[in-house]
Structure formats: structure tokens, C-alpha cells
Image (cartoon, rainbow, N blue to C red):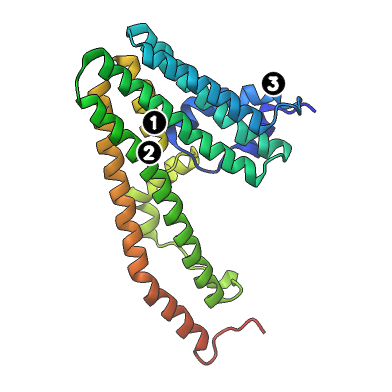
Amino acid sequence: MTVTLAEIRERTYKPRDAWWTVLLVDPLAARLVKLVAPYRRITPNVLTLVATALGLGAAACFLVQGRWWLVAGALLFHASFVVDCMDGKIARLNGTGTIFGAWFDFVFDRLRVFVCSVALFGGQYLHTGRDVFLWLLSVVIFLDLFRYLNGAQMAKVRAEMRERLDEARGPADEDDAEPATEEAATSAKRQVGAYLKNRRIRTHLFSGIEYEMTVFILAPLTGLIIPFTVGAGALLLLFEAWLVLKFFQQAQQFPARLAAVEAERARPGAKHPF
């Protein structure tokens, strides 16, 4: 089976993704997917293992230390992320994705980050004797786990709230859709959002992906391990706090929204699905 790049983009690209993935990973990953897609033995799980092996190679380079070893580690880490993105594309393209594969990919992603963290910051500590690198090691591991566990839990709760609202509303009616106001359509915020959406870039501009890439690619490439790691951690906390605030507001408003929907459905003359 041969596929074109256009087919790969249409069938495997996510509607919205991290800007690092959209700009720096997808263009290369799509071309590599085109090369390996005909070979059914190259499954998503095999690609996950390849990505892990490249990540372990990056960790080995980080541990050795030395200017060019850090550069090699950064390049290997980026290569591992490219291959890691390929496994999802192959799964969507060939219909070979599984529940176990999703778990396998997540667990090995976290393993790669953990090993690279220990190698990069542990190596810096052994090389310099500075305790700050042990603190950074703890912070990087904590923030990586917090980001993904917190994101998954918020997504789960949001899905439950949407499900309860949909049940209360009943079948959707096209006539019930609220037209966008002229003010909303022309607001600067929505214009920026539309610009990013047209380019598949999500508005959450510093997520776990950008955090990992800053710590394990930009920091080793530049040799500025401490400034880049601290700056990345501050940005991640800022964006996560913003997401938590939005989630808190949605959760606070949910009971009133649900009650309003139920009251509307119970109102005499309201539309019913029967």
C-alpha cells in the first residue's frame, strides 16, 4: 500500500496540536510515515520501542556530559520524539491502534523523560558537584507527571460535564445554535484563536510537549541548563495555573448551567424528542 503525503496529512494529523509538533515534527514525521507505512511489521508498538531506544541514547549522551555530547543528546531526543509521533500516525493510517498500544506509548514516554532527566541533571551534578541540579531533577520529574496526570483528570471531568449537559438537553436541534455576535467575531482574542486554529496550533502555547523540548533540546543545545529549565518550569506553571483557573470556573458554573438546561426542557412548550 502506498499513500501520498496529502493522504497522510488528512488522515493522521490532529485537528489541533502543540506548535512544536506542528512546525518542527509533523513535516518530517509525515515523510517518514510515507516510507514505513507499506511495511506492516513496523507497528505502532515497534515505533514506540524505537523511540525509547533513541531516548536511551539521548540519556547516555547527557550522562557523559561535554559540550558536543549534550548536543548529540538533544538531537537524539528530538529524533525520539519524531519517531514517537510516528506511532500514532501509523496507528491512525493503518487502523492498527489498540488500547494496550495507547497505554504502552504513554508509559514508555514517561519512562524516557524520567531516564533522560536522571541522566541530564544527574550528569550535571556529577560533573559540577552543584546541588541545584538535584533540585532541578526533582522539579522536572514532578512537573512532567503533574502536567499529564492533571490534564488527563481535567479532561475526564470535562467529558462527564458535557455528557450530563447533553443528556439534559436531549437531541440537538440545528435551529437552537446561537449565532456568533459581531463583537465576538471581530474580537482580537478570537482572531488570534482563529489564526492559530487555521494552522492547527492550539492556544495552550506552552504545554508538556514544549516543556520537554525546552528542557531536553534547547537547554542542552545552548548549554544553558539552569536558565532554560527554570524558565520552562515557570512558563509551564503559569499555563497550568491558567488552565486550572478556567477549569475551576467551569466547575463552579456547571450546577447552574445544568439546572438552567433542565428548567428549559421542563418549560411548557419546550421542544421534546418525542
User: Is the N terminus in the top left, top right, bottom left or bottom right quadrant?
Assistant: top right
Q: Mark 2 to mark 3: distance in Å? A: 32 Å
Q: Does residue 185 lie above or below 86 as drawn?
A: below
100 vs 194, left or right, is right
* Quarter placement of the C terminus: bottom right
Q: Secondary structure at mark 3?
A: helix
Q: Nearer the viewer, mark 2 or mark 3?
A: 2
**Residue at 41% across, 13% down:** 61
Residue receiving disc 2? 144
- Pick whichever of labels 1 and 2 is earlier in the sequence: 2
| Along the viewing direction, whichever of 236 and 178 lies nearer the viewer | 236
The answer to whether residue 110 is above or below residue 164 is: above
Q: Position of residue 40 (x, y in %)?
A: 76, 29
Mark 1, residue position: 212
At x 43%, y 41%, the residue is 195
The reply, left or right, for residue 216 in relation to residue 133 is right
User: Is the residue marked by circle 3 packed among few (<14), some (14-19), or many (20+) residues within 10 Å?
Assistant: few
Kind of residue indicated by mark 3: Leu
Q: Circles 1 and 2: CB distance less than 8 Å?
A: yes
Q: Report the residue marked by disc 3.
A: 35
Q: Badges 3 and 1: C-beta atoms under 8 Å apart?
A: no
Q: Which mark is nearer the camera, 1 or 2? A: 2
SS label for mark 1: helix
Q: Is residue 42 left or right of residue 272?
A: right
Regarding residue 203, the answer to whether it shows in the image is: no
Sequence-earlier tag: 3 or 1: 3
Give the x, y percent position of residue 227. 22, 25
**Disc 3 versus disc 1: distance between alpha carbons?**
27 Å
Mark 1 neighbour class, 10 Å CA radius: few under 14, some 14 to 19, many 20 or more:
many
